[in-house]
Amino acid sequence: MADNREITIKVNGKDMTTYVETRLSLGDVLREHFHLTGTHLGCEHGVCGACTVVVDGEPIRSCLMLGVQAHGKEVTTVEGLSKGEDLHPIQEAFWKNHGLQCGYCTPGFLTTLFSFLENNSDPTEREIREAISGNICRCTGYQNIVNAALDAAKVMKGS
Amino acid sequence: MGARFFGADVLRAEDRTLLKGSGQYVDDIRLEGTLHGAFLRSPHAHAIIKSIDTTKAKELDGVHAVYTYDEIEEPLNQPIKQPYPHPLIRKDILGYPLAKEEVCHVGEAIAFIVADTRHIAEDAIPLIEIEFETLEAAVRVREAALPNAPTAHKDSKDNIAAELNIKFGDIEDTFSSADHVLETSFLQHRGGCHAMEGRAILASYNSSLDELTSWSATQCPYLIRRSLAGHFQMPESRIRIISPDVGGGFGPKAGFYAEEIITAFASKKLGKPVKWIEDRQEHFVTTNTQRDSWWDLKIACDNKGRISGVRGKIITDQGAYIPWGLLLAFTSMTPLPGPYKILSMDIDQQVVFTNTVPNTPVRGAGRPNAAYAMERVIETVSRHLKIGSAEIRRRNFVEKKDFPYKTGLIHFNGTPMSYDSGDYHQLLEKALDLADFDNFFERQKQARENGQFLGIGISSCIEDTGNGPYEGVTVRVDTMGKVYVSSGAASQGQGHKTVLTQIVADQLSVNIEDIHVEIGDTSKFPQGVGTVASRVGVNIGTAAFSAANEVREKALNLAADILETDLEDLEIEDGIIRDKSRKNLTISLGEIALKLAPMSGGAVPAGHSASLESTSYQASNGMPHASGSNVCEVEVDIGTGEVKVLNYCVAHDCGKKINPMIVEGQIVGGVVHGIGNALFEEMIYDDGGQPQNTNYGEYLLPLATEMPPIKVIHQETPSPLNPLGLKGAGEGGTIPAAAAIVSAIENALTEFNVVIDRYPVTPEYLCNLIDKENQIEV
Amino acid sequence: MRPFEFIKPDSEASAIELLGKLSPNVRILAGGTDYLVDLKHTADVPKTVMDISRLPELKGIDEVDDGLRIGAGVTHTEIMQNPLIKKYAPAMIHAAHTIGAVQTRNLGTIGGNLVTCVPSMDSGPTLVALDAEVNIVGKDGTRRISLTDLFVGPRKTSLKSNELLTEIIIPKRSLGKPANFYKFGLRKGQALALVNAASSLWIKGGCFKDLRISIGAVAPVVIRCLKAEKYLEGKKIDEKLVKEAGNIAVTEAKPIDDFRASQSYRNDLIAVLVTRTINAAIDLADKD
């Protein structure tokens, strides 16, 4: 039997309240209830990483968390990275390093790296590859994503 | 007119939107009142549907309709039409929009449920009561090819979909006079699409206008339009297909699928937009893949390793239906000679139905298969005659002086296979240098002393790119001087908008910011073909160049009249036409555009034509051939059979590069796709035709942790076939990769005499090849 | 995913009480990395799902009188970053690191990994090799059992439907014990183990002491290789003997044959992995 709840999630700094079915994943809630469609669902099986969002400072898979579980938490999605027209240094670095092609997996990589680089200011290439091993990209072959992360780390460290 | 943008690493125009998460993929598009669909799919590889009862499903709250074959109306209740008809197809079998009576693979669509939400539609699936009578399934393609095999379709007598042959030279004479006749046999398996966005459709039928608009995650919107027009018996002009942001294509998204018909049908019946988003498990069992092909080849060569002839047979798994005709079969044969001068060939291919997901091209189509086969031939000769793997290639390459070089084969478009340009010898040397090949053997020796097994492998290939017929481009300047560019060629991440902008900006000497591009929408451009086969860069590049040039000529001609100056004295800079010697004598492109598009009662200046615009379908005058030589280094753990790719070097020649950054992105991504094919990706079916690994935990795509650093170096032999000297680059990374990896593994295991006869090379397979007696624990 | 009722108790006591009241029509959700995937595909949806991911009692890693206490709700990431684990059981960090990817390690819990009880669980072998025990709480109080007694079969534990696994205890005698974990999957990142193994040992007078060998993914549950342990126990360190112990371990396993790997290949891997983990543990040990 359907069970519905009112939940409030702080999404990209703003409290958002909605009434959801308990079975909806956080990814579904972000997309369908908050219309934040930058979070993409690639496998809904916890492997591809396209749906990665940052919850209370840690990257998680929004297909593996129920929306009701996120009640009271702080969530950052790809839409929360840029400030108006200003891209976040990671986004800027992806652009300059051609770190995306079709762009579908990109939000997941950005949110994963956003959290990783906040905590690792001077990462090695190996550490970056390890950090993004939970994200699948079929287009880029990862190399330019790694290069973008190295670039972004330098910029973020300097700022 | 200097080239400011052509050949430069111009950052992509597409990216800001995508990076901010505001891209519009099909599932992101919201139309008021949209209903959501889900399919009941066959759980059996081969079965008859005895009965089906949708009553309970229809009764579920929130369900609007449940359709089965019986509810599909004329003329839609016919099998899907063959988009690539060919006289050699013996059995032209394609499925129905929903299974009629027989299901021929796990995943075939049987019923379509439309509900308020996707969750409700999925809730209704198990409420459909259905009774099957299972039939014996044809699963292993070599067994399916035998005369008395179970048939993949109940009314067929055998499973042979087609038999093809390619032939040139005097094969009998070549083999009877050869110093050596050698053999090589192997299995190739290429895996599925696995674009990170699955297929997706949002169909919206407007009954008052009798118009259908469908957003589809497709590589070929015009194929969808044409096919829907045929099925619905509706003029193409009433159908609009939009390919919005699309999350990767890689071949399988270039097909026409039953879901396109069903979603449109449901929207028409229900009077509301209907959305269907493929989930990942569906992707494994419904989106076309490119699986097994078995090769048996005989090689004729002389004592110096010069290969004179290749003959043999291929058996290809077609899966349950033949939705792409024989494209895959042909593309695995016609490029077979690769960069080598072969005097004669005679190859048969059997295309065989099985009760598995249909097989159609994946990145490179049959070209990676052909390249792999020829590299196996080369390695077989190298091993047998003990000639180094670089040297054996040098001895067999087509030489620079031979271009244009006709291989003797005929492309499936009917024209002779002709290599336009290249320098295969120099390309190989570049790759060897990049990989520090000469010093490898010392590294290998040292590593061996530490108990490590390193190996190096080479692979050389050609790629027929930029095939016809065309892609069109329109360039139009408005009265503000802004430039509008449109083209039929949809993008799935290749950066078409950016490359169009670069070419047009140079030809019109305008700023990139003043150009607005629209692609992938059939209402924005009249005709298009599709983004497949490394063809779009060459085709839109050539057409954009031609259209922009014509606009330039038009503008300059009128400017010369207005400014009363000689045409030769005019130049354009930042959208302003001026006389080179009298710099204050100017007129803007916008002003010219206004003269050519006056208001009612006005007149176009005499001797000039209306509107400052041009449309061109100019294509390459034949197929430009790209080429590549790759060198890779691996380490094998002989205890577990694990292969680690240590580094990968690419020397690539795709002629003049419009945007080197994008080219390199295509190549590196392609290499990783090829490494996935070589080591990881395998769609596994059990003997009953049940797919075994339909999730990303079990179907292994390459991850960042597995991939080596990939170095790319370029050689530019401009194609003489088109004005910009372009050759395609979308698949050049993938085509040679598996062969390089496999050769490197064999090289690492030379002391065990390992000869690899299949890919993907799994650790278990490799362990079994390593002679147990020789196994050394490390 | 089919509909269900969702409850989220705020204390261990209230979780136990609810469990007693609702079982067996309730399923426990911790990190969700395994269960939510299951829930999407199964027709067997429980009436109620109880989220225990935020119970404070299940958190924390502490040194206690009888060893090291790890809360069942500790995530794999927390294990990887914990100084006590680094000091006393660093092989666990390596094991945790091989689980899924960062996004799943941030959600997935060690207790969840153990009670899900898939044969290929990556938390199991190291903990078994360290003689870990678990505390189980039910309405009648707490019981402590050895970890190996928790495992009953694939996805089957000795937990009763109204009980909760609350803590994992690594006994004092195992703290700082040289140990090594090795996982072999078909891909480095995000792969299921075809075989995983862990060994722990002390070296006394150049001889093996208290050797423990545990392997996973090759029997219905994670097992200890008692015969292989016995074969080496008390013997002088010798490469050949270690290799033989690997072969003995093979005889103690019952790997399956499936599309991922054949039985015989899994057997080959057992020998290689057991040998490698023992050798690696030897390298870590003080050789007095």
Image: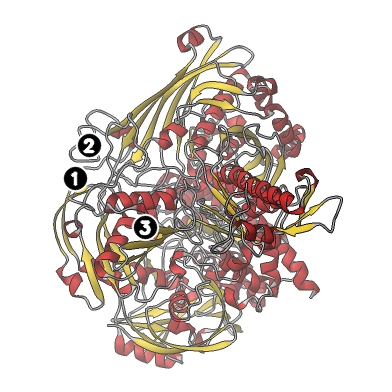
- The answer to whether residue C3 is left or right of residue C12 is left
Pointer 2: what residue?
A: B150
Vertical placement of residue A72 versus B169, above or below: below
Asked whether C209 or B739 is in front, the reply is: B739
Disc 2 marks a residue whose amino acid type is Pro
Q: Secondary structure at mark 2?
A: loop
Q: Residues within 10 Å of mark 1 (few under 14, many from 20)?
A: many
Q: Chain of mark 3?
A: B
Asked whether B556 or B657 is in front, the reply is: B556
In this rendering, the label closer to the viewer, 1 or 3: 3
| Percent x, y of residue C126 | 54, 65
Q: Which mark is residue B239?
A: 3
Q: CA distance from mark 2 to mark 1?
A: 9 Å
- The answer to the question of whether label 2 and label 1 lie on touching residues, with beta carbons closer than 8 A, is yes
Q: Chain of mark 2?
A: B
Q: Earlier in the sequence, mark 2 or mark 3?
A: 2
| Percent x, y of residue C45 | 30, 75
- The answer to whether residue B520 is left or right of residue B588 is left
Vertical placement of residue B731 versus B42, above or below: above
- The answer to whether residue B264 is left or right of residue B667 is left
Q: Secondary structure at mark 1?
A: loop
Vertical placement of residue B84 versus A135, above or below: above
Q: CA distance from mark 2 to mark 3?
A: 41 Å
- Name the outermost residue toward the left: B51
Pointer 1: what residue?
A: B135
Same subunit, labels 2 and 3: the answer reads yes
Q: Residue at x 55, y 52 (%)?
A: B702
- The answer to whether residue B172 is left or right of residue B581 is left
